[in-house]
Image (cartoon, helix red, strand yellow):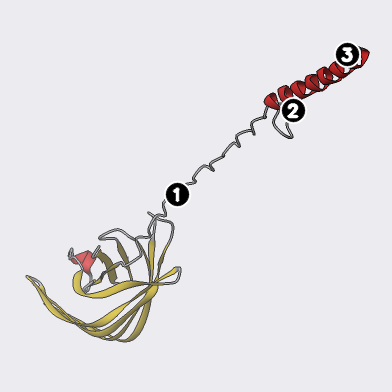
Amino acid sequence: MKRNLSHGWVKLSILSLVIFTMACSLFSAPGMSPTSTPTPSPTPTIIIPHAITPSPKLESRCDGLSGTLEIQVLVGPAEAAGLEPFAVGEIPFSVQAAGRTYLVQGGGPISYQEVLTEEWGTYTVSLAMDTTIDGQCGGDAGSEVLNMAVEMSGEQLLEVRAEGFSGDYPWSGTSMVDLTFPLEEGNTQAGEGRAFILHLNN
């Protein structure tokens, strides 16, 4: 009788152990605790850098500039006679970019003869010369200036004929005039019997 009880107790113990093991295997995955909960990874914060818009670069009005330089000559005692200067000719020029520098170049021949007739007599202007323009255009955007060196070589003759008076005023040789013009149509620089007027094409 005792042997049968002992044998039954052993079977019951083994059965209980098997049931407990099976129950644990239903709720536990291999390598993970039944109570463990996966922790989500933090979402990284994406920082988009603010786009910097460069300031627009103002273009220089010197770039591609062209025009003419009109020469006027004061004939005789113009102020006393109330005469306006004679328009003698125009020298074409252009501006070319050379790196960060804008170079001014121009020139050409001028040939001119004009007779002004008044009640008291005549003024005659004869002129034949070659001209050359060199210089630079530059300055802050909106306040650019033309700096020009104008070389004139040749012959000029002023003849004054009036009642009781006759005078000839020749000039020959080479003269150099330094001029500075704001980029404004019609800007005038005058001196020593000559006037220079700026005319812009663009």
Q: Which mark is residue 33?
A: 2
Residue 179 percent location from the top left of the image: 37, 69
Task: Name the secondary structure under disc 2.
Answer: loop
Res 35 seen here: no
- Sequence-wise first label, 3 or 2: 3
- Residue 45 placement (x, y as % from top left): 59, 36
How far separated are the C-alphas under marks 1 and 3? 100 Å
Q: Residues within 10 Å of mark 3 (few under 14, many from 20)?
A: few
Image spot of residue 73 (x, y percent)? 24, 73
Provide the residue designation for mark 1.
55
Distance in Å between CA atoms under marks 2 and 1: 62 Å
Q: Is disc 2 in contact with disc 1, using a CB cutoff of under 8 Å?
A: no
Image coords of residue 196 (percent x, y) = 28, 69
Residue type at mark 1: give it. Ser
- Label 3 vs label 2, nearer the camera: 3
Above/below status of 110 relative to 118: below
First in residue order: circle 2 vs circle 1: 2
Q: Is residue 149 left or right of residue 201?
A: right
Q: Residue at x 9, y 72 (%)?
A: 120
Q: How many marks?
A: 3
Q: Mark 1 or mark 3, which is nearer to you?
A: 3
Choose top left, top right, bottom left or bottom right for residue 76: bottom left
Q: What type is the residue that disc 3 sits on?
A: Leu
Other residues around mark 2 within 10 Å, as few (<14) / some (14–19) / many (≥20): few
In the image, what residue type sits under mark 2?
Ser
Q: Residue furthest front?
A: 1
Image position of 137 (left or right of 130): right
> What residue is disc 3 on?
5
N-terminal label among 1 and 3: 3
Name the residue at 38% across, 79% down.
Answer: 176
